[in-house]
Image (tube, coloured by chain):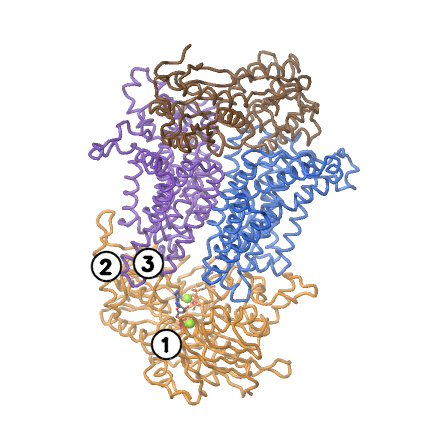
Chain colours: A orange, B brown, C purple, D blue
Amino acid sequence: MPPRLAMSGVRHRYGATQALSGVDLEVRSGEVHALVGENGAGKSTLMKILSGALIPDAGSMQLDGEPYRPQTPADGRAAGVAMIYQELSLAPDLSVAENISLGVEPTRGPFVRRHELRERARAALAEIGRPELPLDLPAGRLSVAEQQLVEIARSVATGCRILVLDEPTSTLSQQDVERLFTLIRRLRERGLAIVYISHFLEEVKAICDRFTALRDGQTTGSGDAKSTPADRIVAMMVGRAVDDLYPRTPRTCGETVLSIRDLAGVAKPESATLDLRRGEVVGIAGIIGAGRTELLRALMGLDPVARGTVRVATLEGWQSPSARWRQGMGLVSEDRKREGLALELTIAENITLPKLSGLTPRGWVTPAAQDRASQPLVERLGIKCRSPRQPVGALSGGNQQKVAIARLLHADVDMLLLDEPTRGIDVGSKAEICRLINELAVGDSVAGRAPKAVLIVSSYLPELLGLCDRIAVMCRGRLGDARPVEAWSEHEIMLAATGAKTEPART
Amino acid sequence: SKPAASVDAQPAGGAVAPAAGKRTIVMIPKATQSAFWNTVRRGGEKAAQEFDIELLWKGPSRENDRAGQKQVVQQFTNAGVAGMLLAPTDSRALAAEVRSATAKGLPVLIFDSAVEGEAGKDYISFVATDNTAAGRLGGKHLMDLVGKGGKTILFRHMEGHESTTKREDGALEEMKTGGAEILSHDRYTGDSAAAAQETALNMIDVIREADGIFASNQTASEGLLLALRKRNLAGKIKFIAFDASPLLVEALRNGEIDAIVVQDPVNMGYQSVKLMLDHLDGKPVDPLVVTDVKLATKANMDDPAIKPLLE
Amino acid sequence: MPADPRLPTRIRSLLDQLGPLLALLGVWSLFAALRWDIFPTWENTQSILLQTAVIGVAALGGTMVIISGGIDLSVGSLIALVSVTVALVLRGLASGGDSSAADASGYGDAALAAVIGVGLAGLCGLSIGTMVIGRVGRVAAFIAGSLVGYIAWRSGLDYRAALPLAAVIAAAAWWGEGKLNSSIPLSPFIVTLGMWGALRGAAKGLADNSAVYPPATPLNSLMRFPSAPIEASLILRPQYWWSPGVWIFLALACFIAGVLRYTQFGRHIYAIGSNEQTARLCGIHVERVKLKLYACAALLTGIAGVLQFSFVEVGDPTTGASYELGVIAAAVIGGASLSGGVGTILGTVAGALLMSTINNGCTKIGLEVWMQEIVTGAIIVAAVTLDKLRHRGAG
Amino acid sequence: MPADPRLPTRIRSLLDQLGPLLALLGVWSLFAALRWDIFPTWENTQSILLQTAVIGVAALGGTMVIISGGIDLSVGSLIALVSVTVALVLRGLASGGDSSAADASGYGDAALAAVIGVGLAGLCGLSIGTMVIGRVGRVAAFIAGSLVGYIAWRSGLDYRAALPLAAVIAAAAWWGEGKLNSSIPLSPFIVTLGMWGALRGAAKGLADNSAVYPPATPLNSLMRFPSAPIEASLILRPQYWWSPGVWIFLALACFIAGVLRYTQFGRHIYAIGSNEQTARLCGIHVERVKLKLYACAALLTGIAGVLQFSFVEVGDPTTGASYELGVIAAAVIGGASLSGGVGTILGTVAGALLMSTINNGCTKIGLEVWMQEIVTGAIIVAAVTLDKLRHRGAG
Ligand SMILES: Nc1ncnc2c1ncn2[C@@H]1O[C@H](COP(=O)(O)OP(=O)(O)OP(=O)(O)O)[C@@H](O)[C@H]1O
Ligand SMILES: Nc1ncnc2c1ncn2[C@@H]1O[C@H](COP(=O)(O)OP(=O)(O)OP(=O)(O)O)[C@@H](O)[C@H]1O
Ligand SMILES: [Mg+2]
Ligand SMILES: [Mg+2]
C-alpha cells in the first residue's frame, strides 16, 4: 500500500532565500508524524506547499499514490488536506460558525445554507470537546486560545485525509492540550494521516509515532519518535549536540529593585505582590489567561493600574512606558509580530528605538550611529544577519526574539520583564536565550556589567524550573507567593496554577 | 410681448411665508462664492431693503454643479417662499424644475443665463446679459487693438459651462472675422485663479508671441493677469478681461489690462427682485430684460456710467 | 447608549445596526421641530429621497468595496463618464434614425443607452479590479491594443482591419504579461486615485469639453417627481409614492443587502475584508472575488451615473465632483470600517439619508452653504465617535 | 530596474530612493525631446518649480503624516482657510492704520498676517491631532466654549465678560472630558474628511463667500519670479535663481528631511507608522508624537497656504480644491506607503516635481486638458507599479 503522502525533492525559494532545497517526507495513514527543525528550517513552508498555499519550484507530491499538485488552497482542501496554520488565521469579524466553514460553505445556488452551516459548526465543536463555544459571536471576540480551538474545529469539520497542525499548542492551556491529544488519537484511529509540528520534544514523544527532521531546508533524518533518544533528534535538527539547555551559574542577590504590593489592573491581575532583587531570576507560572501578561503590562505602564503600589528602586506610582525605560525597566512582548517588533524597520532601528538620545554627541540620530550602537549587541547575542540594516522581518523567529532582547541591553535596563521569551523558538535558539538570561542575571565584573533582575513569564515549566531562582504562580488573576525553585515540582505548579490546591494562607 | 395671463392669474405667493408676514424671496445663483454672484446679491439686497422683504440666498457651493443647483431648487419649491430668482447653471437641466415650480404656483424669474421654456409662461421673466454679444464686444475691441493679422489667444473657463462658452464663441467669431491669427483657443483654465495662472505660466511662450488675449471670465482673467505680472509681460500684450474684481480694476488703472467687459450685476440683482415683486403685486412685467454690458477702458473707467459697474 | 452586554447576541447586533438609523431619526426630528411647517411634509420627504438616490446607489457599491477592505475614489469621475456616455448614445441614436422612428422607440433608445453606460462602468470596474489584484499588465495590454487600433483607424485603416489588429496586439501584450507570471497587487487607493483623474479626463474628452444635450427620452422621467397628486388614495398605489429612481435605489439596496448577507459571494467579501490572508488560505479565490466585487461596485456606480444623467438631463463631464467622499462618508457614518470586514447596507442607506437630510434641513432652516459644510463635517466626526463609543460599550 | 541584490545594502537603499528621481528625469527628458525649444529652458524650469512650491510644501507635511500611517484629506481646505485669513488680516491692518503708516510697515504687516495664518493652521492641526488620538471631547469643549462666548458677545455682552465666559465653559467641558477618562481614537481618514468639509465651510464663512482682495504687500512678491535678467552672472547670485517661495520650499524640504532622518521625533514617526504597538512598548509617547506630528504637518500646510495666497494675491475660499489628492499622489509616487513606516522627503519632492512637470509638459506639447488628466492618472498607477516591481526585485 502506498503511503498516504509522499513528498520528494521539494524545493522552494522566497526571493533571495532558498527556504527548501530538496525535502523528502513520507506519512502513512493512521500515524501521527512529527516534523521538527529549527526556526526557519522550512517546516511551515513545506506544509504550505502541501496545502496549496505555495507552489513549489521543483519536486513532486503523491497522495495515496496519486500525483498531487495543488495550485490553490482550495485544491488542497478538495483533495482532503486540512491545515492549521502557525499564525492564527480566522476572519475576526465573521461568526464562529462561519469561520468553521469558511471557503467551503454549504450552498444552494449562490445562497449559503445558514442552518446547515450552524449544524456543521455545532458538530465540529462537539467533536473537539468544546461544545460550549458560542456559534454566533464574531471570532475576534474570543480569546486567543479559543480562537485556536475554532481553527482546530475548522480542520475537523470538513472531512480530510491529512491533517496538518503547525505548532497548535503554543497558545493552548494544559487542559486543552490534553483534549487536543485525545482528539488526535481518535482521528489517528480513524485512519487519518496527521502531521504535527512542534518545538516541544516532550509533546513529540507523547503523541507522535514517527518524526522527520529538517535543517536548512533539507531532510536530515527520520525515524521512530518513541524510540529515538531526544538528543539524537536535537542533533539532527541543530546539526550539533545541545549539551546544557539551562545553564546556571551561581548568582548573588543584590538590593530590591522592584517591589509590588497588591497590584490590580482594570480587569486583571486582581492582586499581585512580589519583590524582585538584582541578580535573581524570578519566574511566573500559570495557565493561559491567568493574567500574567497583564501584570507585566501594568508594571511597564502599558495598561492602567486600578489599585496597589509599584516601587521601582525608590520611585513609586504608575508611570508611562517611557518613564519606565528611563527608570531601568524593559519589556519583551509575548507577541513578536503584533507588538514586539516593527518588522519593516531595520535591526539597528529596532534595537535603538527605546533610547535614541545620546547616540551622537549633539543628540542627532544617524543611521551610522544606530549601526555603531547595535553592532556589538548583534555580535554578543549572535544574531544571524547580513548587516544591522536588514529589516527585522527577514529574520527567523529565534533571531527576531534576540533582537527584542537586544533592545533591553541597548537601553541598559536593570529589570528585564520577559513574556514568554522562548515561545515558538527552536531548541538551539532556546538554549542560547537561556544562556543569555543566566549571563545577565550573573553580571560580569570583568566587563563591568552589573547583575540584572529578570522576571520571566513562561508556560513551559521545565524552562522555569531550570532557569529561575524563585517561582510564583498566578491563578485567575491572583499571584501567589514566590518560593524558591527547590520548593516546587512541575506537578505542584500545575496544581497551584489550576487552583486545585489552595496556597498556604498569606500572613 | 406681454406676460401670459395665466401667470398673472396665479395667487400671489407668500401664504406660508414665515417671519412676521414679511414676504420671502429666494435668490439662487450658480455658486455662492464668487465676486460676481455676490455683487448680484448686493443688488438684490438693495431692492429687498427698499421694498421691505426678506431675501434668502442659497446655491451650490461650486460653479457648474447642475445636480447641486437642482437640489437647491427642489428644496425651495416646497419651502413656502413667495418667489424664486434663479440663475440656471444649465438651460436644460433646470427646465423641468422651473416648470414644476411654476405649476405649483411658485413664480420663478430667471436671471443671468437662459433656461429652456417660454418666458411669461414657464417663468415670469428673464433678466440677463447677452453673453454672445458680450463676447463679441470684447472680441471686437481686441481686434480693434491688434488689427488684422494680429496674433490672438482665447482663454476659456471650464468645460461645459454655458454662459462662458457663449462668450468664448462670440469672441472667437469676432477674432475670425477680424482676420486674426489665433494661436490658441482650446485652453480650459479651470475653476480657480490659481489653476488659470498655472495654465498661463505653462503657456508663457505662446503668450509672449501673442498680440492680444481675451479671457472669458473673472478667474481666467485674474490668473492670466497674475501670470503676466510674474513674467513682466503685463501691459505689453493687449488684454481684454471679463467681469470686474478689485484686482482687475486696479490693473485696468495701471494699464496692465486694456479693457474689461463688464456686466451690471448690481442692476441685475436689483431688477430681478423688483420684477418679481411687481409680479407678486399683480403688475405686468416684461418677459425679457436685457441688462447692459459695457466695455470699461482706462479712458472711461471713471465715467459715472461705468464707475459703479467696476465696484 | 451602549447595548447592554447581557442581551443575546442577535438582539445586540440588531441594536448595533440601528445606531445610524437612530442618528438619522434624531437629526430628522431636530429639523422637524425647527420647521414643522415645511420640513416633515410628504413632498419634502420625496425630495430628500430623490436627492439621496444617486449617492445612495453609488454608496451601495462603495460599501461593498469598503467591507472588502478597499476604497474607491473614482466614483465621481465614473458617474460623470457614464452620464456623458448615456447622453452621447442617445444623441447618436436620435440623429441616426429618422425622427418619427426615434419617437416611437423612445423606450428602446433609453434602455440601450442605459445599458451601454452601465456596461462601460462595469468595464472600468473590471479594470480597477484587475489592477488591484496585480494584473496591471492586462489593463495596459487592453489599452495598448485599443490605442493602436484607434490610431490605425484614424490614419485611414478600414475598421475591419483595425479591429483585428487591435485584438492581436492586445492579445500579444496580454500573453506577454501572463509569461511574466508575476502579480503586483496595488492598493485600491492608488488605482482609484489614478482612475479618478483618468476617467474624469475621458469624460471630458468624450464630451468634447462641453455638456452633451441629448433629445428627451423616457430616461429623463426616472428622476422626476411622480405626477400623481398627493392624497390619501396614494397609499394603494406605491408606484406613485416616489420617483422611479428612488424605487430603483431602494430595490437595489435590498438586493445588495441580501447578496452581502445571504450569499457565498457576500460572505466572502466580509472574509476578505476581515483577513485577506485567512480568506486565501481557506480556499477562497480572493482574486476572483475581488474582480467580481469591483465590477459589481462599478455597475452600481454606473446605475448611479444613469440616475445622475436622468436627474440633470444633460451629459455633464464635470458632474459628480467629490461624490467619492460623499460615498465614503455615507458608508462610514453607517458603521462601516475603513479597515474592512465591517459594514451593512442598512447603515449605509441611513448614512446617505442622514447626509441629504442635513443638506435639506439646513436649507429649510435657512443656514448658509458654509455653515452647512461645517455642520456636515462635524456630524461625520460625531457619528463615527458615537459609533465607536457604542461598540466599546458593547464589546 | 530592480536594484541588484548583490550590491551592498547601503548602495541599494540609495538606488531605491533614487527611483522617483529617475522617473522624473525620464519624463523630463521625454518632454525635452519633444519640445527642446521651449521645454528645457531656464525660464520654464522656474515656472515648474514655482508651480510645485505650494503642493510641494504641503506634501512635506503630508509625507510625515503618511509615514506615521495616517492620511490628511484636509490639506486643500486648510490652504483655502489660511489664504483667506492672511488676506483678511492684511485688509484689516491696512484699513486700521492710516495709509502712509501702512506703506512703511508693509513688511511688518506681511509678517504678522503670515504668522497669524500659519498659527491658525497649527491650531487646526492640533485639533486634528487631538481627535486622532481620541480626545474628540477636548476639541468639542474648545468649540463649545468659543461658540458660547461668540454668541454672548454677539448678543451684546462686553468682550471682557464674554472671553472669561468662553474660557470657563471650555475649561468645564474639558475637565468633564478628562473625567470620562476614555480616549476614542478615530482614524485620521475620518477626522480629516470631517475637517475637509468644516475648514472649507469656515473659509467661505470667514471670507463672506467671496474672494478677499487685500492691499499689495511684500508677501505678494514671495511667488513672483526674480526680476534679475537671466544671464551667466546669475550663477553667483543664487537668490535670483528662483522666486523666494521656491527657496522656502527647498529649504523646508531639507529641514524636514533632516528632522525625519536625524532626530528622535523623526525616527519615532517611522516607528509609529511601522508598528504603533511596538512604538508604545518602546516608551514612545505615541499620543504626544502624533499631536506634534499633525501640528507640524498643519504648520507646513499653513505655509503652503501663505504661498498660495501670495501666488494668487487674493484670499480665495475656493482655492486648493483636491490639493489633498495631489499631496497624497506626490508622496505615493515618491515611494511612501499608505500603510505607514515608509517614505522619504526626497521621493516626495521628486513626486511633486513629476506631477508639475507632466502638467507643464503636457501644456507645452499642446495636449488638451482632458488628455493631460488621463496621462497623469496613468502615470500615478505606473509609478507605483514600477516602485513595487523594483522593491520586489530587491527584497
Ligand atoms: N513570506 C516569506 N518571504 C520571505 N521569506 C520567507 C517567508 N516565509 C518564510 N521565509 C523564510 O523561509 C525560511 C523557512 O521559513 P519557515 O516559516 O518555513 O520556517 P519554520 O521551519 O516554519 O520556522 P518556525 O519554527 O519558526 O515556524 C526562513 O528562512 C524564513 O525566513
Ligand atoms: N480581548 C482580547 N483580544 C485579543 N487578545 C486577547 C484578548 N484578551 C486576551 N488576549 C490575549 O490572550 C492571551 C491570554 O490572555 P492573558 O494575557 O490574560 O493571559 P496570560 O496569563 O498572560 O497568558 P499567556 O500564557 O498567553 O501569557 C494573551 O496573549 C492576551 O494578549
Ligand atoms: Mg513555522
Ligand atoms: Mg500572556
Q: Is mark 3 within 8 Å of ligand 2?
A: no
Q: Quadrant of residue B67?
A: top left
Q: Position of residue C350 (x, y in %)?
A: 34, 45
Pointer 1 residue: A476
Task: Classify 10 Å Cα crowding around label 1: few (below 14), some (14-19), many (20 and above).
Answer: some
Local SS, label 3 = loop
Local SS, label 2 = helix
Q: Chain of mark 1?
A: A
Q: Earlier in the sequence, mark 1 or mark 2?
A: 2
Pointer 3 residue: C3
For residue A367, above or below residue C18: below
Task: Classify 10 Å Cα crowding around label 3: few (below 14), some (14-19), many (20 and above).
Answer: some
- Label 1–label 3 contact, CB within 8 A: no
Residue drawn at (57%, 74%), measured in percent from left and top?
Answer: A328
Which of these two is toward me, C38 or D349? C38
Left or right relative to D345: residue C143: left
Q: Position of residue D121 (x, y in %)?
A: 59, 47
In space, the residues marked 1 and 3 are separated at their CA atoms by 28 Å
Residue C153 shows in this picture: yes
